[in-house]
Amino acid sequence: MKKIQTKDFKIKHSDNVKINELPTRVDLGADKKEIEDEIRKVRRKLAEIQTEIYAGGTPAVYIGIQGMDTAGKDSLIREVFKDINPSGIEVHDFKKPTALEHNHDFIWRHYLTLPERGKFGIHNRTHYEDVLIARIHPQLVLNQNIYGINTLEDIDKKFWKKRFKQINDFERIQVENGMKMFKFFLHLSKDEQKNRFLRRIRRADKQWKFNAADLKERNYWDDYQEAYEDVLNETATGHAPWYVIPADDKPTARLIVARILLDELKKLKVSFPILSDEEKAKFDDYKKSLLNE
């Protein structure tokens, strides 16, 4: 199996990304069974690191996952993180904003669900929805009742530039306060999305996931690709990089994400808390007390 190199998927601010030049499929030189066996090995190691992070109480680890409909976000979360102790991980799936959320800035509801130190926090869809779906459907911005934004004409290029800056500032503040931040874009081809929609329609156990509204959004495919391209170019920073994951093959995408997380988190200086000699000496007394019950 080919070695997965983080640098092959990491986007730098200076890259000037052209999204149609980024692959949606990669060949690791392994079959499905080999890839799934490797995922199991990697996620066990990932769970070990998370246990050390949880025991030490730092840092917080944020994992944001974006992608077009059917890109495999849900199944990736299920398969990559299933070995982690539930006490050390939280998953938040963001839907249409509520009235309360609309009465605050667009990042507010995401801020409330950021992971505490020592935990993994996964956001299935993220604050980037407000420069993606809201860009395709700017009426959603008007629904936010922002002072000074009264018409669609007010939502111009300057508005989106300002929103990108707000996102970069938000992420910088988190990292400067001790958070490790990962942002994954599951890059899916239009043909593969079509195949996955058809699979949902055919299979009784998948039909519940089908939403006719998703087909309407598919009509905006090119617009979404342009929006994602701008997101990658405007918000890939040194402290909060984007990782573009070829998503046409789900097992391969899961392994790449798991490997990137493991390789990057291994660089952290984390370990179980070190007890003092005085504290260690007490264990003999605790042991005797238990044995003498």
Image (tube, grey):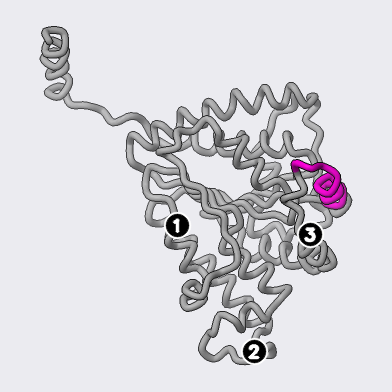
Residue in the foreground of this view, choosing between 5 and 112? 112
Residue in the foreground of this view, choosing between 176 and 82? 82
Which quadrant is the C terminus positioned in? Answer: top left
User: Tags 2 and 1 in contact by the CB under 8 Å rule?
Assistant: no
Residue type for callout 2? Asp
Q: Residue at x 64, y 77 (%)?
A: 140
Crowd around label 2: few <14 · some 14–19 · many ≥20 (10 Å)? few
Residue type for callout 1? Thr
Cα–Cα gap, marks 1 and 3? 32 Å
Residue range highlighted in magenta:
193-205
Residue located beneath label 2 in the image: 154
For label 3, the SS is loop
Q: Nearer the viewer, mark 2 or mark 1?
A: 1
Q: Residue at x 53, y 65 (%)?
A: 168
Q: Residue at x 54, y 91 (%)?
A: 148
Residue type for callout 3? Lys
Residue 18 is tagged as 3
